[in-house]
Amino acid sequence: MPDTQPDQPAGPTPALPTIGILGAGKVGTVLSRLLLAAGHPVLISGSGDPAKIALIIDVLAPGAVPMTSEEVAREADIVILALPLGKYRTIPADALAGKLVIDAMNYWWEIDGHRADLSDPRTSTSELIQSFLPASRVVKAFNHMGYHDLDEGPRPEGAPGRKAIGIAGDDAPDLAAAAALVNAAGFDPVPVGTLRDSILLEPGSELFGANLPAEGVQDAAARFPETERGREVAAARADEDAA
Ligand SMILES: NC(=O)c1ccc[n+]([C@@H]2O[C@H](COP(=O)([O-])OP(=O)(O)OC[C@H]3O[C@@H](n4cnc5c(N)ncnc54)[C@H](OP(=O)(O)O)[C@@H]3O)[C@@H](O)[C@H]2O)c1
């Protein structure tokens, strides 16, 4: 008799990480749906009382649990920032200490107002968020694809025509965790560089708004230094280094 029966159950499946989403708007609710469908528990917040978003969550992301931002930040394993970038100082930084934080935010002057701190070509906005969250590890992901494309685009891994999402960060295990989340949501993750490089995923770049397969995202990322925006960023950073 062999020691183990071949048809014995393999034991409990390790639980998927609980995902927290700060922002219950267009992107936050779409990401909630995609990650719930992949089997992740999802906690979500708006700017205030969770009771205010309970109905919308029931309709748009049933199964996600509305909480305050502070509670989401404390209780989730990985937290996605899906609020207006201009409000980043309202993010509960202390509660996010030690966590992987996925930055899906963009500077949009129509929403955020004209802000020199959010549009300085020397600094990616994710670097700014990393400075605001010094005890967290920030990875950029889910920012460049419009929410309709996110909603309509998920496909299983390996499916023909699967669309891709660029990710950027400074730490290999964190990038791997973000890549797993992008894959779970239904997209091919494409690492495009460091947090500093994540400026190539921001508004003003060719990749912003992109709804492309992996080769398209890789090619556009490689072209960035030759684009007008890429040259502007390189010149601003060279001036800073020379100063
Ligand atoms: N729209 C897109 O296609 C798209 C795609 C990729 C990335 N993004 C980025 O994702 C972010 C959200 O965009 P959106 O279009 O989803 O905006 P949205 O529909 O206006 O939703 C923003 C949400 O953030 C909430 N919020 C504000 N401050 C908060 C805080 N301190 N904690 C938790 N939630 C807070 C708002 O709550 P209240 O209503 O209570 O203020 C609202 O639920 C932006 O940075 C945007 O650039 C957007």
Image (cartoon, helix red, strand yellow):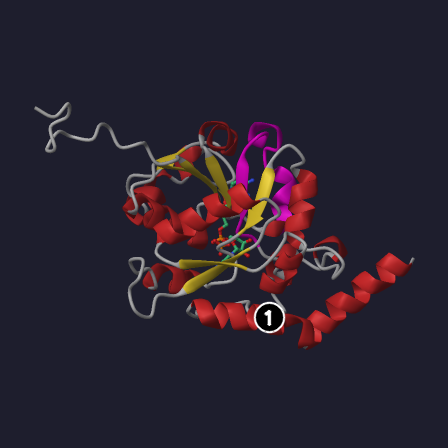
In which quadrant of the rendered view does residue 163 lie? bottom left
- Where's the C terminus, which quadrant? bottom right
How many numbered discs sit on the rendered protein? 1
- The verdict on label 1 being within 8 Å of ligand 1 is no
Q: Is residue 210 visible?
A: no
Q: Is residue 83 left or right of residue 186?
A: right
Q: Position of residue 55 (x, y in %)?
A: 33, 41
- Where's the N terminus, which quadrant? top left
Residue shown at 62% from the left, 47% from the top: 170
At mark 1, the secondary structure is: helix
Query: Compared to 144, does 68 lie above or below?
Result: above
Residue to which mark 1 is pinned: 222
Query: Compared to 66, does 171 lie above or below?
Result: below
**Magenta stretch: residue 173 in it?**
no
Q: Position of residue 158 (x, y in %)?
A: 31, 62
Residue shown at 50% from the left, 34% from the top: 69
Residue placed furthest toward the left:
1
Q: Position of residue 242 (x, y in %)?
A: 90, 60
In this view, the residue in front, 30 or 187, is 187
* Disc 1 residue type (three-letter): Ala
Residue placed furthest toward the right:
243
Q: Is residue 175 visible?
A: yes
In this view, the residue in front, 52 or 182, is 182
Residue shown at 33% from the left, 60% from the top: 154
Sort mark 1 into few (<14), some (14-19) or many (20+) by Cα contacts within 10 Å. few
Query: Compared to 125, does 232 lie above or below?
Result: below
Give the magenta range.
86-105
Q: Position of residue 230 (x, y in %)?
A: 69, 70
Residue placed furthest toward the front:
1
In this view, the residue in front, 218 or 49, is 218
